[in-house]
Image (cartoon, grey):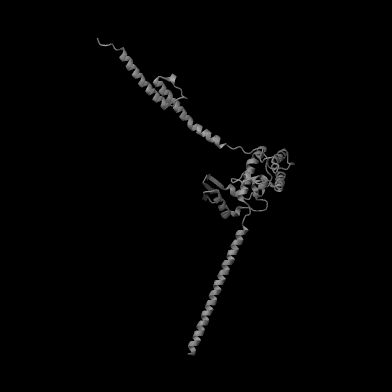
């Protein structure tokens, strides 16, 4: 009896030890997974880029369209310290490896993967090729959007709001600092002319009086889509017009009624119908005339 009681006590103690060891193992595995998750989040936050790719693209679009044509005309090279220099854009290398084949086809130049929209390839760059982004200080082109009027070049424009004098003053100061660093007036005549041009093209519009507008000197010349469509339509319709004139003249010559018809009056099909009806009428008149000239039988 005592031996059975002792065995029961030993078994209960062994069961308790087993439960304790099991919970200890579960707790350790939970703590390990929690540490791994925290470490992964820490690493992901360490590589997180706090710069808008969309606004950086809009800023470069403003520079490329409203500044670079005049810089190229002057054969001037932007200094490396200029924040508008392409190499000072943290997304420049990724944007250069973005291949646009069609309206719904984008391809990554690094891994040749295809995407259906630009936003998807942007996400791909952020997830797979984020190591190519140099997010050091001063390389976020989106920070210059206020000075470069990015809202006018973005695809989805913001609605107009009331002018803020303090914000306009800050943007003007930033714009003038860009002019000083990119086009130093002591670097020759080209730099001096571009300095004045930049102030007039970008900086003078940062005011609330409404007298100046951004980009008064215009930008890169682009082909007018309406003019291009009109030229294509003309090329397509011109052969058809000559075909109609040719058929019209041919049918008119066969009918012998050129003095009644004009290429600008009747298309060829109606000309053909008219000629056919005229021939029928002539035959009727000929029969009437022959009948009238026949002698009556005596």
- For the point 36% across and 19% down, the residue is 282
Would you identify the image quadrant in which residue 261 lies? top left
Residue 217 in picture, x, y percent from top left: 66, 37
Task: State left or right for residue 161 relative to residue 106.
Answer: right
Task: State left or right for residue 286 relative to residue 101.
Answer: left
- For the point 48% across and 87% down, the residue is 4
The answer to whether residue 31 is above or below residue 285 is: below
- For the point 54% across and 35% down, the residue is 228
Residue 20 in picture, x, y percent from top left: 55, 77
Task: State left or right for residue 234 relative to residue 158.
Answer: left
- Give the number of callouts: 0
- For the point 54% across and 72% down, the residue is 26
Q: Nearest the camera: 29 or 258?
A: 258
Residue 31 in picture, x, y percent from top left: 58, 69
- Specify the farthest residue to the bottom: 1
- Specify the farthest residue to the left: 298
Q: Quadrant of the C terminus?
A: top left
């Amino acid at each position: 009896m005592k031996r059975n009681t002792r065995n029961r006590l030993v078994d209960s103690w062994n069961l308790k030890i087993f439960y304790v060891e099991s919970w200890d193992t579960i707790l350790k595995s939970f703590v390990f997974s929690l540490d791994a998750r925290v470490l992964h989040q820490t690493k992901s936050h360490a590589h997180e880029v706090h710069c808008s790719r969309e606004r950086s693209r809009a800023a470069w679009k403003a520079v490329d369209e409203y500044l670079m044509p005049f810089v190229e005309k002057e054969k001037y090279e932007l200094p490396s310290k200029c924040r508008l220099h392409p190499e000072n854009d943290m997304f420049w290398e990724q944007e250069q490896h973005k291949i646009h084949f069609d309206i719904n086809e984008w391809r990554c130049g690094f891994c040749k993967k295809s995407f259906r929209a630009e936003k998807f390839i942007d996400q791909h760059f952020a997830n797979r090729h984020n190591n190519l982004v140099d997010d050091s200080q001063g390389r976020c082109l989106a920070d210059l959007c206020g000075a470069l009027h990015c809202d006018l070049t973005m695809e989805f424009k913001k609605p107009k709001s009331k002018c803020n004098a303090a914000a306009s003053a800050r943007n003007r100061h930033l714009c003038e600092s860009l002019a000083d660093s990119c086009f130093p007036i002591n670097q020759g005549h080209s730099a001096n002319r571009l300095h004045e041009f930049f102030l007039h093209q970008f900086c003078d519009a940062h005011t609330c009086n409404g007298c100046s507008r951004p980009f008064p000197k215009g930008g890169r010349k682009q082909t007018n889509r309406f003019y291009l469509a009109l030229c294509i339509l003309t090329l397509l319709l011109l052969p058809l017009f000559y075909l109609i004139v040719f058929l019209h003249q041919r049918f008119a010559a066969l009918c012998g009624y050129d003095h009644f018809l004009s290429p600008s009056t009747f298309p060829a099909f109606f000309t053909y119908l008219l000629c056919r009806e005229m021939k029928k009428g002539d035959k009727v008149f000929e029969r009437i005339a022959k009948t009238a000239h026949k002698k009556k039988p005596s």
